[in-house]
Image (cartoon, rainbow, N blue to C red):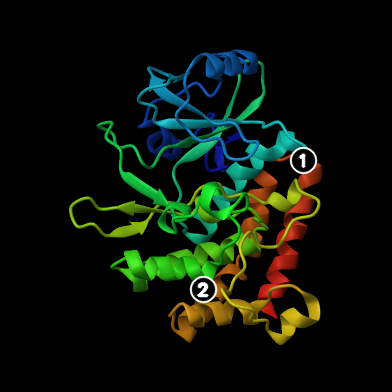
Amino acid sequence: MSKCHGCLKETNDSYCRTCLQKLFNGRKINYILPFTRPEFNEQRMNQSTRLSISGVQVKYSAKLEKKELVLTDEGGRYILKPIPYGPFQQMDNIPANEHLTMQIASQVFDINTPPNGIMYFKDGEIVYTVKRFDVLENGSKLLQEDFAQLANRSEENAGKNYKYNYSYEEMAELMKKYVAAYPVEIEKLYSLIVFNYLICNGDAHLKNFSLFRNEQFGDYTLTPAYDLMNTKMHVKVEPDTALQLFKDDFMSEEFKSGSKYTRVDFLELGKRIGIKTDRVENIISRFTSKEEKIIELVNNSFLMDELKNRYIENVALRRDRLMR
């Protein structure tokens, strides 16, 4: 038996039947891409990419042809994210980290994520692969706006740190302005904020949250979650959260004593954004009660063995803070 390159469960093939259906429409796909990293880079340079490059992580569009994914500049249904270049630690584990974190989000906490999996270049280098959620089977695109766009913030009008100089409370205010089903959707956003804290994702900035726009009615709903990762594995010094929780200078006594967010801070955030206290308590408790399932997925992941314990330890520290 081997492990599925999608859900990480035991299977007789590279992908289990369920993941083949979700990710590749049921086709038995070759998980070895038909090109090498140098060929990938050359084709990227020769074609006009239409996908944004976030930080150091290169992305490229691909489409399914027969039993293989091939690079494309038009009509891509998949995004390929290989090992990035940059000044961070354990860069070669970033694709496995993102894949694992996305699987934890969906399998353990029922967070809506797009189908994703692990593939390899022809020369053996690992690649994180995710199916685009903004492109329908007929090729049409859904109208998507990230929270930087909703807040009308850009480098030109808000400086280089425009993605970070904001708060999660203000994001909720944008939700209240644009989302008709706010009571439902705000709990999803709040859950994602708590998850990012638990999993040590210090890069959950404005552009890593988005809304779909219903063209017929003009209202919005949250998109599936994306770009989820334990960034603490790769960055020595990084804030615990990409954004501040609160739009003002509020600091709990616990935060004053330790300069770290704890359960009381997330209770305060939930209260401020209009979620009932019992619902907030239930959401936080959900994220502090699944330790065994997280450990199981980490141990089954494609991370290097020496990093698996570090991932588990990082999450355990955050869980302890959420339980205080």
Q: Quadrant of residue 68?
A: top left
Picture coordinates of residue 124 (x, y %)? 67, 20
Observer-nearest of 312 and 318:
318
Q: Is residue 151 above or below residue 303?
A: below
Would residue 178 appear left or right of 217 to someone viewing this image?
A: right
**Residue type for callout 1:** Phe
Would residue 111 appear left or right of 58 to someone viewing this image?
A: left
Would residue 234 appear left or right of 113 to someone viewing this image?
A: right
Picture coordinates of residue 103 (x, y %)? 55, 48
**Residue type for callout 2:** Ile
Q: Quadrant of residue 50?
A: top left
Picture coordinates of residue 98 (x, y %)? 61, 44
Pick whichever of labels 2 and 1 is earlier in the sequence: 1
* Residue indicated by mark 1: 88
Q: Is residue 162 above or below residue 120?
A: below
* Residue indicated by mark 2: 283
Can you say which quadrant of the picture contains the N terminus? top right
Label 2 or label 1, whichever lies nearer to me, is 1
